[in-house]
Amino acid sequence: MAGLRMPLKASTSSLSFIVRARCFHLPPLVRRLTHTTAVHIQAIEEQTLPFYHRKYYYPVKIGQVFNDRYRIIAKLGYGAYSTVWLAWDERANEYASLKVSVRVDNNNGEHSPVLNEISMLQRLKQFAKEDHPGLDFTRLARDMFETESLAGRHHCIVYKPHGTSVRTLQEVFPNAMIPKSLVKSLIHRLFMSVNWLHATCDISPRNVLMAIEDDTILQDIEDQESQDPSLPITSTIHAAMPTVVYKSRPTMLAVSGHPILTDYGQMRLVEGCVNQDWWMSDLYRAPEVLLRLPWGFPADIWSIGIMTLELLEGKNLFDPIDHVRGQYVLPLALAQYIGYLGPPPLDLIKNSPIFSTYFDAQGKYHPFSGFMSILT
């Protein structure tokens, strides 16, 4: 996301923006199936992600029809476990967003974010009839089904299309600092969604989308593809089998001030459960998770708090990453948390399984010898 710049086309007071997005998840788009392809020798799109070679992405093609209903128009983005496409619902005569997962490995199904998201969406559907304002800011599935490829089984989730992520929205503003009035509006609505969910989420700016005001921008995406068709690229780079990949392209995108919480691959139940495992995104991990202590709903409040400061200040509050090795550094995370918040209460950390490794008997933090080599 570094280096992304998008011109602001409307006033912030109306909480309505038009931005030019130049990043992987706001891309190119539509046309019928074609036999014209290009061969690419460099990694692009999802191929640039870690462990791509171990996964099997479904080879979606523009113009393809899924489930005898959803015609693919354009690629909207990609992630570690799926690609996302703009589609036309030929039964409902409306636009839809189609999320197509990587192959589901039956040997590791219980740990699959794909299957977890399916399970959570099915659970949320049970509560969707409730009269709760949080429903307006929560992304629920319109449809779910499975499809097959030569690699195996893939899950597909159909959503209402939405706009850019809050992470991308940050790039509209100088130094990535979103005005306080807009942040207050976003966070207030986000709390409504979290209050309704009945579970905890992995909340970060990338998992919060901005609602679009009408279908005009979706039609614009379709028009772009008609005028300048995307070229399907055949590649074997880092792939377990030859794959067809589409590049993303710049897109004008209008967004409102309404956030939509999405992506439930890491969503967890709390009521009646004892959660004490490693969880949450690296930059938003709650202290109790860090210390391997039981965690619950307050973990979401921590994530939202960290995100709020990040949106206002335009930078990460914590950065416990070894950027040379690309690894999360637990002792560095502890040092940063203590640097901001002060020493944790002794009666809290003495129950942590990592207490004796990082703290003395009085609760004073003492980095182990390996940590010092990271700092030098």
Image (spheres, rainbow, N blue to C red):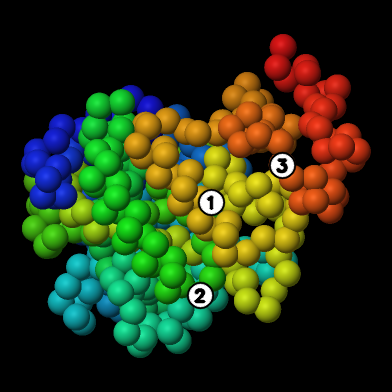
Where in the figure is residue 261, as x and y percent of width and height? Answer: 38, 61
Q: Secondary structure at mark 2?
A: loop
Separation (CA) of disc 1 from disc 3: 15 Å
| Residue 134 vertical position relative to residue 162 in the rendered view, above or below | below
Within 10 angstroms of label 3, few (less than 14), some, or many (20 or more) residues? some
Under mark 2, the amino acid is His
Which badge, 2 or 3, comes first in the chain's sequence? 2
Query: Residue drawn 36% across and 67% down?
Result: 192
Where in the figure is residue 241, as x and y percent of width and height? Answer: 55, 49
Query: Residue drawn 53% across and 51% down?
Result: 302
Under mark 3, the amino acid is Pro
User: Label 1: which residue?
Assistant: 302
Where in the figure is residue 293, as x and y percent of width and height? Answer: 75, 55
Q: Is residue 18 visible?
A: no
Which badge, 1 or 3, comes first in the chain's sequence? 1
Query: Residue drawn 45% across and 60% down?
Result: 263
Which badge, 2 or 1, comes first in the chain's sequence? 2
Q: Is residue 272 visible?
A: yes
Query: Residue drawn 37% across and 74% down?
Result: 141
Separation (CA) of disc 2 from disc 3: 29 Å
User: Label 3: which residue?
Assistant: 344
| Residue 100 vertical position relative to residue 247 in the rendered view, above or below | below
User: Label 2: which residue?
Assistant: 198
Q: Which of these two is toward me, 304 or 371?
A: 304
Separation (CA) of disc 2 from disc 1: 17 Å
